[in-house]
Image (cartoon, rainbow, N blue to C red):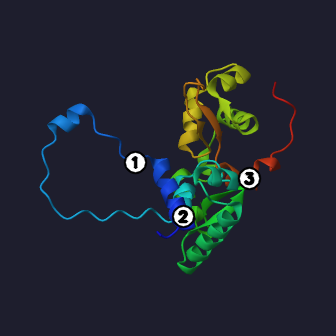
Amino acid sequence: MPDEPTASEDLGRAYAEMLGGPGEPSVDEQADALPAEPGPAAAPQAPPAPLRILEALLFVGGTPLTPARACQVIRGLSVEQFTELIDELNRAYRRQDRPYSIQSRDQGYVLALKPKFRPVMAKVFGGVREARLSTQAIDVLALVAYRQPATKVEIDSLRGAESATLLRQLVRRGLIQVMYRAEAERKEVSYGTTPRFLEMFGLQSLDDLPKTQDFA
């Protein structure tokens, strides 16, 4: 009787399915293909370990990775396993003296630089003073922060002015990012703030934003 697959193997197969395997060749491709010489069969490639799958999800960045989202992407992963893998990765990073760690943020987790390495980010993107954001750029940033996910049309409507150039500037500064791209059901790109935005303004989460009346 064959051995039952392990949880790690199940998660690996789920990851392979998520990425999508090779499709069936078309009729033309089959007709053009030359007969292959017989040879030894290639060894099957082992699926990635769940730890590496989770690390890849964190490396991609964007909005904080929540346990629910990770369990949705990696079929078969439980919330307890998710927490254990996060702790295991952080222990490995400490042992290896990595310049980054996995940090809790907004009910999820992000891969972020340790405080002593943040000047490196400032060198690349510019610090608070070096950013030199115009009043108009700060207005757009505030609207995105409070209304996110916000579209360009929403920002233009609230400001009564064109905002495309300012949105691109804030994306280049690493203060906002594309949260949802235009799709069949979603006609426009939506923007939201980044972890750098929270770091720049000394916020732990978006809940720490000053309370304000509804922009509408």
Which tag, 3 or 1, sits closer to the chain's start? 1
Judge depth for marks 3 and 1 and give the one in front: 1
Q: Amino acid at mark 3?
A: Asp
Read off the residue under disc 2.
50
Distance from the alpha carbon under mark 2 to that under mark 3: 23 Å
Q: Position of residue 65 (x, y in %)?
A: 64, 53
Distance from the alpha carbon under mark 2 to that under mark 1: 18 Å
Secondary structure under badge 3? Answer: loop
Determine the image quadrant of residue 104.
bottom right
Mark 1 residue crowding within 10 angstroms, few (<14) / some (14–19) / many (20+): few
Nearer to us in this view, 67 or 63: 67
Q: Amino acid at mark 2?
A: Pro
Which tag, 2 or 1, sits closer to the chain's start? 1
- In the rendered structure, the answer to whether residue 67 lies left or right of residue 166 reads right
**Residue depicted at x 86% and y 37%:** 212
Nearer to us in this view, 86 or 166: 86
Read off the residue under disc 3.
106
Q: Label for residue 21?
A: 1
Nearer to us in this view, 210 or 150: 150
**Residue depicted at x 63% and y 50%:** 72
Mark 2 residue crowding within 10 angstroms, few (<14) / some (14–19) / many (20+): many
**Residue depicted at x 54% and y 60%:** 11
Looking at the image, do the residues carrying marks 3 and 1 touch, with CB atoms under 8 Å apart? Answer: no
Q: Amino acid at mark 1?
A: Gly
Secondary structure under badge 2? Answer: helix
